[in-house]
Image (cartoon, rainbow, N blue to C red):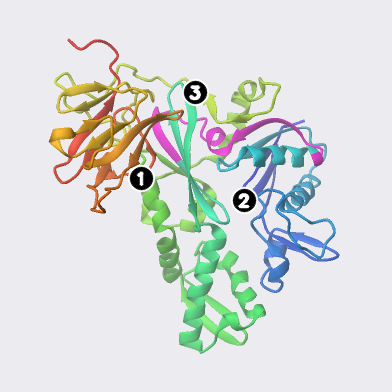
Amino acid sequence: MPLTLIEINDHQLTLRQGEKSLTQSGYALVEKDQLLFGQDAFARGKLSPGNFYCRYWQQLGYEEITTPNAQVRHFADLAYLQLKALTEQCSNIQDTILMVPANYSQQQLSLLLGIAGSCQLKVIAVINEAVIKLAHHQQAGKLALLDLGLHHCNLNELYADENLSLVNTHVIPHKGLHDLYKHLATWLNKKFIIECRYDIFATARAEQSVYNYFNEIIPCEQASYQLNISDKTLKVSAREIREQISHFFAPVLASASEYPTVYITPRLKTILATDTSLEAMSLLDEGKLETNIEYHLNNLTKNKQIALITRLPVNLNVNKAHTGVGLHGKHQPSDLTTPGASRSHLACSHLAYKGHAYPLTDKPLYLSSSDNNALSLSPEKSSAAKLTQTDKGWQLSLTSRPDGENSPQVLINDKPARDKQLLYRGDTISLGREQATFLLLKVEEALQ
């Protein structure tokens, strides 16, 4: 009997078993005598908004909700009932692997395992979805996976060397599919008011009619679309729709641009369609998922106790002698700026500044654009950033001036730094107008 793979994503809750694949959106409509899930619930959500739910997978927990149905008292009840209904469509489910998002807490993971047990699933492994989907990746260095949920986008940051490891995840809120629908509905309503003198939000039925068009107009496969609502007709071009979608997701795509290698899931690429930013991204090949599972099955199941797996051995050929510094102390381009170049692993031992390598310790290091006090173990008035060691590696935190003055700009690899951004060997930190430059490196042996 083939393994059963269940992917927990509120946009596409997916069950795979051999060649069979079932997908359902995380929508629920709770009525006294019936429960509707997926598109059946979505098609009636605006007609009964008080009984419509779409956050129960994202906010999985025992938060109490008031419903007319005795079966549903918490978000966990909705998750259980939807998963149960989905699994009942497959016969003889045995060994199951759960693929989960990185933003789930330990409490949510424990609850998910309990729900799976109540659905009579024998869970043999729980793995981060980004790690297993990219387990076939063959290039050492930093990479990212950009994915879509109902209420946010996930930018999963990974690193590949001897292992493929999940390093961090950036949840970009209010940029999910359901948020896009709200954005498009508001935009279309303005067009209806201007061109048809009609407010589609005036009645629940008209608003629902607009939402029911979204599955047709996305991903803009026709030149134009004609929307007929309450005897009013609006013609909208695909170009206008694509412009709205690109504008909505622009902050998401900008966040992904700092990575040398970015994969995008098919469900997000389908919506973005022809956006030019996609040219720099690789489409995730989900056809390799089953092969990845089979190849790593022993690693996934070797521990009797079920725990979240965020790392898999991939044994890429990494040049450990590479430090990012040439024989004369000049910085050589790493794969953060040169696509296709190889990278060494995460560990860093020194910070280079003006030809000198300063050892990194467990104490915070404050960086300044001032030549007089560029590096300090204590915060100074001129400090712009703080470098600290965490269990995930070296992290850069942005500091603010006590006098309220603007701090100098901080760049990482010539791009604006984020607060609490993780750093890697070969990364450069630039401060201020004069661009005082620091370089993270590892000294493998004594310098001659």
Residue with the mark numbered 2: 58
Q: Residue at x 54, y 25 (%)?
A: 312
Q: Can residue 218 be seen in this view?
A: no
Give the mark, 1 or 2, whose residue is nearer the N terminus: 2
Give the mark, 1 or 3, whose residue is nearer the N terminus: 3
Q: In this view, does 363 lie above or below 251?
A: above
What range is drawn magenta here?
118-144
Amino acid carrying label 2: it is Gln
Helix or strand or loop: what does disc 3 sit on? loop
Q: Which residue is drawn at 55% across and 59% down?
A: 177
Nearer to me, 268 or 359: 359
Q: Quadrant of residue 212?
A: bottom right
- Looking at the picture, how far across and down is residue 268, in whole percent? 51, 52
Helix or strand or loop: what does disc 1 sit on? loop
Query: Residue 314 shows which numbered tag?
Result: 3
Query: Does residue 77 appear to the left or right of 362 in the view shown?
Result: right
**Are circles 1 and 2 on residues that touch, CB within 8 Å?**
no
Q: Is residue 373 visible?
A: yes
Amino acid carrying label 1: it is Arg
